[in-house]
Every structure is written in structure tokens, then in C-alpha cells.
Amino acid sequence: MSTYHRREFLDLSKRTALGLAAGITILDDARSVHAAAANDKITLAAVGVRGRGIGLAQGFLERGDCQYAYLADVDSNLFASRAKTIADRQGARPPQCVQDFRKALDDKSVDAIVVATPDHWHAPATVWGCQAGKDVYVEKPASHNCWEGRKMVEAARKHQRIVQVGTQSRSAPYNIEAKRYIDEGKLGAIHMCRIYNQKLWGNQPVVADGPTPSGLDWDMWNGPAPEHAYNSTFHRYWNHLWRYSGGDIANDASHQIDLARWLIGVDYPKSVYCTGGRFASEGAAETPDTQVAVYDFDRMVVTFELTLYTPYMLKIAGETRENDLFPYWSQCATRIEIYGTEGLMIVGRHGGGWQVFTRPKDRQPVVQAQRYGRFPDRPHQENFVQCLRNRELPNADIEQGHRSALMTHYANVSYRLGGQKLVIDPKTEQIVDNDEAMRLFRREYRRPWTVEDEV
């Protein structure tokens, strides 16, 4: 049984063919890419600076070769605290704070934007960023709907921009090793993969519309979604409303879906079926709290299962991913199970590591191989910055992020149509012979917050 040792594997990952092919360099010191004199730093603009947005900003600043010129958020109440955090960390002039990120796009000194908005803003921000000549780091899921994801790819290619999706598991050394293990045939032929997303996320009550809070540009926050008066549930619980997102299959499970798709090497499903419902509670949520999707590929079936009323299912703890530990797999909320003819690989996202199990002996598990994990934010940001400099495609290039997002969108379209089986044309990505489904393939955009046909 082989065991992951951090320094040994970091050194190994620099030399592997897989790492070279993916354009990956994993360094012990993330700042070693550049000595980064002040005039040689990469200049960034943050688009969205709540929890994930400010976390990303701090991560890029810790590198030492990045600086923030702008913090953009529709809620100006965040500006004072966020600007102080950034200024303290970068030791330079404080960033400009703007409610409309397009002001940052007009500034030629900005090299790239880091997008951490609600899902319905990912595509407009990315497309506009590419059109303005900016590279883009955009959080998952890549898109709000099938159509706009392809537009993001078209914009990146047309304007020759680097677009990295925030599915950081693709940059994790332990996952690179899992990919190699599978590609070398050590798991045998794979015909089944199960993806899980199980946790506790309660519903919210239906509330009346109300006055817009001071300092919030609600019209821009609502953006491309249909016009609506301010509603506090919309503002804070947007993940579970179709107008803004696709539920937790998009919000959280997009990580597992992307990781699984990469590991097992599949692209477009031949067909998709999805069922479920909102069973555990009544309230404002439109998306399901119980969801099962089945994806048919050539000689392989992939399933996805979601529950949002299961507090005994646990996401991978910091203690696990910061040490040489594995989750308790049977109650790991974000695991992937890959069934090969030679063994079962269980993978945990975001530092959960992986183990391969073969036939038990004396009723005890037999572990054929394993690797411990670490949280992969730093190597993913490292990969993005390297690609800004060398112009290679990043590990989570927008083409791959788009294809993974399609799996969530296809499932949700099937679910919203009562569990219709959808047949997919891989050449066009469209749903075959189903006008009702194709009406959910894209949204109507509210001007001026639009993604146009020509990007």
C-alpha cells in the first residue's frame, strides 16, 4: 500500500508527464513564480467581495506577485472593511471601490478580473471581461444555463483570453495522481461512477417584497434576471431560485461533478434523466432538496444523488485536509465512487484524498492504494497566474468548466419537466427533438445586462 507524502509528491508532480501535459507546476512556495517588483505584479480587479470573493482576494495577495486595483460589488456597505483588508495585505495604495465593475474593465492597467458573484452574473462578467481584453478567474458553476456557457468559451477563444473556472480540484496534486492511476488502467475498466452531495441546508420562508437596503444597487444585483422588486429572500437565498441559480447541484455539487468527469474521462452524456422534489420543508426554495440524476455514456453510467436534510452527512473537515487523514467515507457528504473491474476508488473533493479498495479479507477492508489530500486553492491560483504569463490553457479552462456545467443544467431541465429523459446531441450540445426542453436551454436577458449572440 502506497501512502501520500506531501514533499515527495510535490516533487513528483513537477516531473510527471501528466503534470507537464496539463501545464501544471506545483511549488512549495506559491510566491516563487515571481519576485514581483511593484511594477511587475499582476493587477487584478475583484468582482464580488462577499465571502468567497474576499477569500480569493486574500489568496492571490498571499502569493506576493499580485495586487488589487479595484474591488467591485453592488453593495457599497462592504467597501470599508474589504478595502482595509486588501490594503493591509498588499501594503500599497488601497484599491478603488466601485459598484459597477465595468469601470475596472475600462482601466487598461487591469490584467485580470476575479469573479465571485451569484451564478447568474458569471457569464456576463466573463464575456464582458474577455471583450475588454481581461483574463478571467470565474467561480463555479461556470454558467447559469446551457447556452451562455458556450458563449463564454467563444468569448475566451475569440479574444484570446485565459479563463479559469474555480473548480480547484483539478489542480490538487492528489487528484492528479488519482487521474494518473485511472489512466494507467490500474482500476480496470470503469462502467459506473456515483457522485454525492449530501448535507443540511434548510428552506427559507416566503417574504414580501420590501425597500432596497441603503447602499445596494439592486437593479444591477438582479442583473440579467427578470425585473423584480427587492426581496430579502431573493438576495440571500438566491442559490435555490431558478432565476439566479440551479440549486445545490450547481452551487456545491459542481465541484464533485467536474472532478468526476475529469477523472473518468467523459464529455457529453448521450442521455440524461433526473427526478426528485422539495420534500423536507415548504418555503421559498424552488430547487429540489432530494435529487437523483442518471447520465448515460458509452459503456458507462454516472449517477448523482443529492439530499439537503441530512446533518449526519459531513463535508470534509479542515482537520482532515490539513493532515494525513481520510474522511469516514460512508458519511462523507461530497464523495465520488468510481467502480472499476479491478477495484473501487473513493475520492473526496477539496483535500479529502482517495483510496482504492479491493475484495475484503476477514471482513476487513483491503486498501490497494491511497493518497492523502490538501485543500487545492493555492495550486489552482498558481496555475492561473502561470497561465497569465505563459498563455497556456489552465487546468480548469472554460471549455471544461462549461462541459461540466452542462451536466448540472441538463439534469435540472429534466427535473423541471417532470423527469423527462433528454437525448443530447454532442455536436451542438442541444437537446434533441424537445422544444419544451430547449426553451430552458437559455434565458431571456434583461437589458442592459445581456450576453449577445455575437461575443
Image: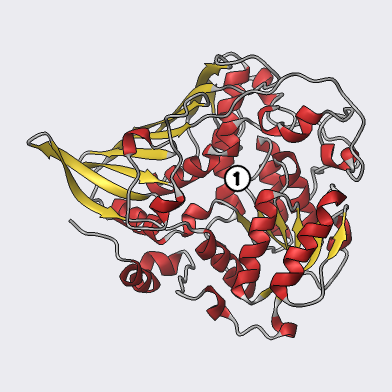
Residue found 33% across the figure and 68% down from its top: 9
| Quarter-of-image position of residue 409 | top right
Q: Does 269 sit above or below residue 158?
A: above
Q: Amino acid at mark 1?
A: His
As rendered, which of 267 and 182 lies closer to the eye? 182
As rendered, which of 173 and 437 lies closer to the eye? 173
Q: Is residue 267 visible?
A: no
> 10 Å neighbourhood of mark 1: few (<14), some, or many (≥20)?
many
- Where does residue 195 sit, x and y in percent of width and height? 42, 35
Q: Does 138 sit above or below residue 393?
A: above
Residue farthest left in this picture: 362
As rendered, which of 45 and 303 lies closer to the eye? 45
Residue found 87% across the figure and 56% down from its top: 102
Q: Is residue 180 left or right of residue 208?
A: left
- Where does residue 134 sit, x and y in percent of width and height? 75, 64
- Where does residue 212 sit, x and y in percent of width and height? 91, 35
Residue found 80% across the figure and 54% down from its top: 128
Of the 4 image quadrants, the one containing the N terminus is: bottom left
| Quarter-of-image position of residue 174 | bottom left
- Where does residue 38 sit, x and y in percent of width and height? 73, 83
User: Total number of numbered labels?
Assistant: 1
Q: Is residue 231 left or right of residue 179?
A: right
Residue found 61% across the figure and 64% down from its top: 59
Q: Is residue 183 visible?
A: yes
Query: Pointer 1: what residue?
Result: 402
Q: Secondary structure at mark 1?
A: helix
